[in-house]
């Protein structure tokens, strides 16, 4: 294995100058930097990044733990995180808990052992014991799309109780009197809060029924499956308004109902999605949905982690709650929307 000393000898400079070029290249004269680059290329020198981080006591790796990667929402958040991380000179490692707290614990243990620069948690299922570990080790940690359970962690989230409340209130204002929430499980914090918001909206209006149609996954296929079950009910037993856990589930419902001439959106069932993904406006019937700002989530999370990592004293803690926006499109407008 080629050593940094061999690179220095080939370039005709000191070991310290090579080290300076590797760590702070802007502080090395252009001609000297050129000789060092040529020496590195000629010798095939590969930097031992793990050893460098151990000596420096600081990693350039940022970890992002998503709830699920099949949901495009988390992919877009991760994209925003990666762009902001790159601007900050950091490299991103992306993993998914897939809703499994035990799996997430394994990832967190690994990241702590690797002394990552910071961890962004966007799973909604993080165990208290894992958060205690991160706090005890003073690992810069930010929760995304979740509220921090204590004042030891920064977080950036959307008020999902309010978002779901607005969605259901909108359906009721459109004349719906039997509302269903499609999604699950309620062990996921975001789902539990959206159910809570729906229940609050229903409780505020007399004569409105409410049910939860739970599912283990939140995919287009899962939405189609639940849609088929709803369509198989007698007409009088079907909900006339549905709030889906996300836009993927809502898209599956649109596909299912669209195959049945006697079941129309929104005249028979008005529909609201969640997240306002890019495809929401281009489904067969454009989706009314609750918008959550993925770009703001990603950029803010990286900034909060960076602030903690660069702090000289106690880790600074900030709690940021973003207000959701209901984006109204054809799928919920019972008087003016096109029919399937």
Image (spheres, rainbow, N blue to C red):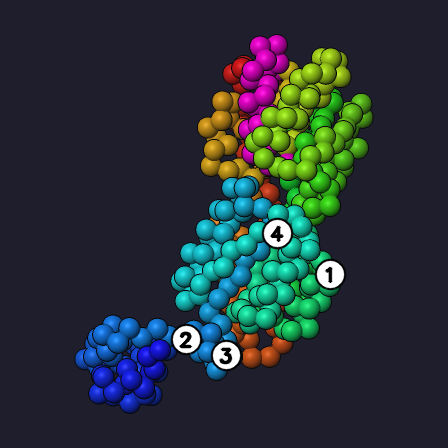
Q: Position of residue 61 (x, y in %)?
A: 48, 66
Q: Which mark is residue 54?
A: 3
Q: Can the viewer see residue 63 in this picture? A: yes
| Contact check, label 2 and label 1, Cβ < 8 Å | no
Q: Nearer the viewer, residue 59 or 7?
A: 7
Dot 3 crowding, Cα within 10 Å, few <14, some 14–19, many 20+: few
Badge 2 is on which residue?
48
Residue at the location (23% across, 84% down)? 10
Q: Residue furthest front?
A: 1
Q: Nearer the viewer, residue 248 or 104?
A: 104
| Residue 54 highlighted magenta (yes or no) | no
What's the CA distance linking mark 2 and mark 4?
A: 29 Å
Element carrying mark 4:
loop
Q: Can the viewer see residue 272 in this picture? A: no
Q: Residue 76 vs residue 272: left or right? A: left
Badge 4 is on which residue?
97
> Which region of the structure is painted magenta?
245-267
Q: How many marks?
A: 4
Q: Earlier in the sequence, mark 3 or mark 1?
A: 3
Q: Closer to the observer: label 4 or label 1?
A: 4
Q: On the rendered image, what quadrant is the N terminus found in?
A: bottom left
What's the CA distance linking mark 2 and mark 1?
A: 35 Å
Q: Earlier in the sequence, mark 3 or mark 2?
A: 2
Q: Position of residue 286 (x, y in %)?
A: 51, 26
Residue 259 vertical placement versus 195 (above, below):
above
Dot 2 crowding, Cα within 10 Å, few <14, some 14–19, many 20+: few
């Amino acid at each position: 294995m080629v050593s940094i000393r061999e690179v220095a000898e080939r370039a005709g400079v000191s070991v310290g100058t090579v080290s300076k070029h590797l760590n702070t290249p802007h502080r090395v004269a252009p001609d000297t930097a050129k000789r060092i680059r040529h020496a590195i290329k000629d010798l095939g020198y590969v930097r031992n990044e793990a050893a460098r981080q151990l000596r420096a006591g600081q990693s350039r790796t940022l970890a992002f733990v998503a709830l699920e990667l099949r949901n495009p929402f988390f992919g877009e958040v991760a994209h925003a995180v990666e762009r902001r991380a790159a601007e900050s000179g950091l490299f991103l490692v992306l993993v998914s808990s897939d809703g499994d707290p035990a799996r997430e614990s394994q990832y967190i243990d690994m990241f702590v052992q690797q002394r990552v620069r910071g961890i962004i948690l966007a799973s909604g299922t993080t165990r208290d014991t894992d958060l205690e570990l991160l706090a005890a080790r003073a690992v810069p940690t930010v929760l995304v799309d979740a509220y921090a359970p204590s004042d030891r962690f920064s977080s950036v989230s959307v008020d999902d109780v309010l978002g779901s409340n607005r969605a259901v209130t909108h359906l009721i204002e459109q004349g719906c009197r039997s509302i269903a929430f499609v999604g699950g499980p309620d062990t996921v914090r975001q789902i539990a809060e959206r159910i809570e918001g729906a229940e609050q909206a229903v409780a505020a209006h007399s004569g409105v029924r409410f049910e939860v149609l739970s599912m283990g996954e939140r995919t287009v296929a899962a939405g189609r499956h639940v849609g088929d079950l709803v369509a198989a009910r007698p007409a009088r037993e079907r909900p006339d308004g549905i709030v889906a856990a996300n836009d993927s589930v809502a898209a599956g419902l649109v596909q299912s109902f669209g195959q049945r001439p006697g079941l129309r959106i929104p005249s028979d069932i008005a529909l609201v999605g969640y997240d306002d993904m890019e495809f929401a406006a281009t489904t067969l019937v454009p989706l009314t949905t609750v918008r959550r700002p993925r770009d703001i989530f990603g950029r803010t999370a990286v900034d909060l982690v960076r602030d903690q990592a660069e702090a000289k004293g106690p880790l600074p803690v900030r709690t940021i709650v973003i207000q959701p926006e209901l984006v109204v499109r054809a799928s919920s407008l019972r008087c003016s929307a096109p029919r399937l």
